[in-house]
Image (cartoon, rainbow, N blue to C red):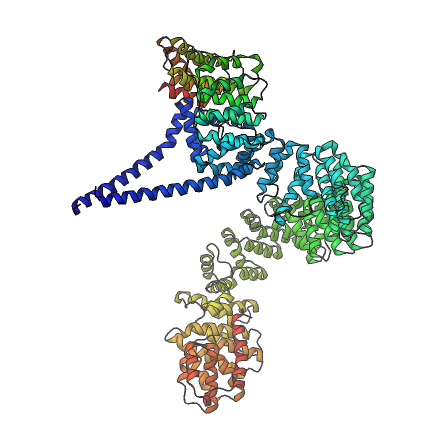
Amino acid sequence: MSKKTLTNLIILALVVAVAWGVSYYQRGVRAAAVMKDLAQADDYQAYKALRKVGGLGPAATAQAVTLLTAPEDYVRARACVLVGESGQPRYAAQVAPLLADKSPEVQMAAATALGHLAAPDTAASLVGVVQDTQRTTEVRTAAARSLALLASPQAVLPLSAVLQSPAEEKNSALRQALVVALGATPTPEAVQIVAAEVSPAVEKDATVRALAAAALGRSATEISDVPAITAAGKALIAAVQGPEEKDAEVRIAAAHSLGQLSLPAELSEKGHAALDQARTDDNYWVRQAAAGSLK
Amino acid sequence: MDDNTRRQTTWIIVIALVLCGIIYASDQRGQVPGALHRLATGTLTQQVAAAQMLVDRGKMAESLKGQPRWVQTAAVKALLEIGTPEAVQQLTESVPVLDEPVGAWATASLSTFGRTAIGPLVECLQNKDGAVRTAAQAPLTKIGGAPVIAALQGFMGAYDDYVRASVVAVLSGLGEPAAPVAIKLLLQKGPGEGQTSAAFARAQNTAMDLLVAMKEPALPFVVAQLLPDKREQVRSNAALMLGRLAGPLGPKGTLVVSPLLTLAADQSWSVRRRAASALGELKVLGQTPAVLGALTALLQDNDEVKAAAVKSLGLIASPSSAEPLVTTLITNREGVTLDLVTALQLVGPPALSALGRGLQAAAPEARELATQAVAAIGTPAAPPLLAGRLSDSAVAVRQAAALALETQATPSVVGPLVAALSDSDARVYGSVLRALTLVGKDAVAPLVARLGSGDPRVSLVVSEALTTIGAPAVGPLAEALRSSNANLRQWAASTLGDIAGPALPALRPIAADAGAPASARVAAALALGRTRLPEAIAPLTTLAAASAPEVRRAALQGLAWTRRPEATTPLLAGLSDADSTVRLTAADLAKDWQIGDADAQLTKLLAGSGETKRLAAVALAFHSSPGATPLLGALFGVPALAADKSEVATILNSVVVDPAEPPMVRRLALIGLAYRGDQQSVDAMATYLDPRNPLAPVAARAIGILGGRMATSEGVASQTAQLAAGRLLETLGQATDPTLRLQIAASVSLMQGAPVAALLDRLNTAPEDQRADIAAILGALGKPANDAAMKERGLNHAGKEWVSVSVYLIGNPDSLKFMARLPKTEQPSADKVEAARVLYDRIMKIRASAFS
């Protein structure tokens, strides 16, 4: 490489660096301006500001972190949203304390943000929120949804306890989130619990049953525990074939999941028979799901 | 680096860039299907990542369209997991493309995001897709609270009405907490900072819509905060809203009565007007003495308030309102005329007794309005009241009554209706005609009684009514054929003919009844003919053989009216009838009858003898004209002489010279000769060219047409044309009667080139007072005279000038060029041109007319 070429390369690198620096600075300035908009009471105007922040990158996140301690609860909540959207686990430590914020709105935003930040060490805090019946359903649901993203095996037992708690029987949104969270955790225990939730005898809420059936299609394929897989297969076969399942959404999810699952040999024939029978189901999508699974 | 290496390097870079582009595009294109596949089969983490990708690209709703149920479910689940405001917005936007119950699940889940969802949901309220807006409304209402109200407040003046409607839908669902926002807007004195007047007006309207949508919870706010306000606009808005609230409140609508009664006594007339209108919204609930009393009192207010009160009294429709409304109609109707009619209509039958007073009012306008109100009420009690107005002195009242009876007439009012047929106003008797048609069978007897009234207009209207009534009228009409009233018989026959098919069964017996009066059979024959039905031919043929000549004549006329080929034989058989009047009738009809094998049958009759043969020849001669009528023949020229038709000409020549033949036959023969005549015909017809002969104009015209035809032939025919022209010109020279002279002049002008030489010669030798006639004839001859006139240079000065007048009148391109080339000294004088032009115009008018 000649000296001249080297000089040119250095000049080019300098130009690029200066351009980047100017751009970074400008984004910082814009972020500061947008942060002011973010602090206003009108949620719609704040939402418009929030959308502008999206393109401003780390500079905006850094400024948003400073708002986590803002006096207005809605500002703290919006800061949680912004920080959460960064997906940087390093901010989890600053967000986690807000789970104990006096405002449920902030608690919910913090719980949601922790899911996006994907810091495994926050799972315990989130489990605590889910278990805390003094909190609002929205906050607990948000925490359960975040736990689904963390897929922490340690959360399985506490979450299943909440799911099976009679006190939560009518808390549909929370139960849905719990089933999704358990279904996202590939452990034999979680699969067994979710498989039980497919049965209408156990779970009255059809949406929860449908989510459980849909979750088994993936979670049971990621474990090798035969009893758990067998339980999952039986639950799905019963949902597809059993006369007690009246809800088409559950049958659709079960038929689709059966196609993803590798059933043990003793269940394989029954699975096929169930799917074959489902091809004559009244519901169009059940028939489609069964046909797709049989392929 | 050498050139080769540099070139290769450049190519490598270009190819690499292109490949990068292709790979990038391929990857982009595959990302959405890949994401959907991951949603269908991936783990939760994969599903969330796929959904996040679609959210980032703003393609969630588009991608989910038509996807299987499990993909939709997975997408909703993943979006709920993401939970960011953008995810909430795209989840809401996806609701319309989601199947049920997935869509309902998604909608129900939106509210679980609490305040985070307000921004995106408000954004969705502005979406152009109504389904997206609807999906956003319920979650916003469920989230509720001050943040939702604050976020929506700014949209109350939004430009798009669907956005404002969505705002009203959400805020009204929040109930009382949203009311102060609306009240504050309604109390605001003008546009806020940065707000346009239009936006402010929209915002105020939205505020009113919001309060109305809230229903009962809004009432205390309106009453407590708007009613006491000093500004009349605010109180007026309050009245408006109270009125709009009355209906939706149902039985609780009476809650608005007290405040509205307060406003009805307001010092501002605009508030009183609004209050009056609002009270009407109570409908039946307003049938209370307090409400009715207040509205009745407002009938004495200014026109605007009075109109509102009248409308409201109509809406409330209390029978007790009828009297004050009718009183207003009689004494104080200015500005509310149509409103009064509508209001009385809404009050309905109970208003009829009060309207009796209106029908007798002194002012025609009041009577007209009362009539309209009675008509609008339209109960069985109305027709007698309306019929009573058919004899009103004011035409407008009669028109209104008759118009209403068009749809409401009953048998009970037939008498006045039939009497009204004599009304002088066309709209009145036109409506009466339709009213009688509506009554139908029950109107037949009185209508038939009026049919022979002697007034043609009345008879025509009655005939139309009976024709429309149709079959039920046939019996009485058939009976009328036997009447001694000729007028009645004639109209009855005409009407039965128009009724056609249903009338046949009644007409046949009369036609077949030899013992029936001849006048009845004549009428039946005419009626049968007028039906123009093939079934009428047989009875008409029977009638054509009846003993009475007038019946046979009528039968022939009836046959001719049918215009059917089957009628040819019986019609032409009339030419052989024993009675001469029947034969003449047959001849008159046969000359215009070319249907079926008429010509063949007529030709056969030529082989016979006597008058039948001659009449057949006349008819055949008429059939030669191009339009089968003398008029059309004269207008469109004449056909070339057919040598094989000389027999017809011979017969007609003999008819023409036979003084024993009736004048009508000779006249027809003369006309026939115009089309079928030969060389001998000129001499035969020339015997008529005596000014004292009434057939002279016909003969002159016929000679003119015949001469014109022969002038285009060669040899003897051409000479005959010259002879004919000579005869006519000779008569022209002798005739003193101006009418006859004009007739002859017109006839000469039909003779093409035949008279040209003689006319030019006469122009030279005739006295000055006859030259204008000759110049006019030359002008009317047109092109055949043009060349000869232009060549003529040997005349004396006066004749030359008249030649120029002729050329000028010809007026074709050649003659105009000729005139343009003439020196000024040889141009004809204006008075001579004018004198000849007057004659020329008269000649052309006669030529355009039929045989006189």
Query: Which residue is pictured at 83% across the width and 45% down the height?
Result: B297
Frontmost residue, A103 versus B155: A103
Q: Quadrant of the N terminus of chain B?
A: top left
How many marks the image carries: the answer is 0
Q: Position of residue A192 (x, y in %)?
A: 44, 11
Q: Position of residue B685 (x, y in %)?
A: 50, 74
| Relative to B22, residue B370 above or below | below
Spot occupied by residue A54 in the image (x, y as percentages of width and height)? 46, 36
Q: Is residue B292 above or below residue B516?
A: above
Question: Front-most of B686 and A99?
Answer: A99
Q: Is residue B501 visible?
A: yes
Q: In the image, B95: left or right of B350?
A: left
Would residue B355 be seen by someone viewing this image from the given angle? Answer: no
Q: Quadrant of residue A166?
A: top right
Vertical order, B316 against B423 (above or below): above
- Tell me if A217 is positioned left or right of A200 in this view: left
The front one of B270 and A116 is A116
Image check: B173 left or right of B610?
A: right
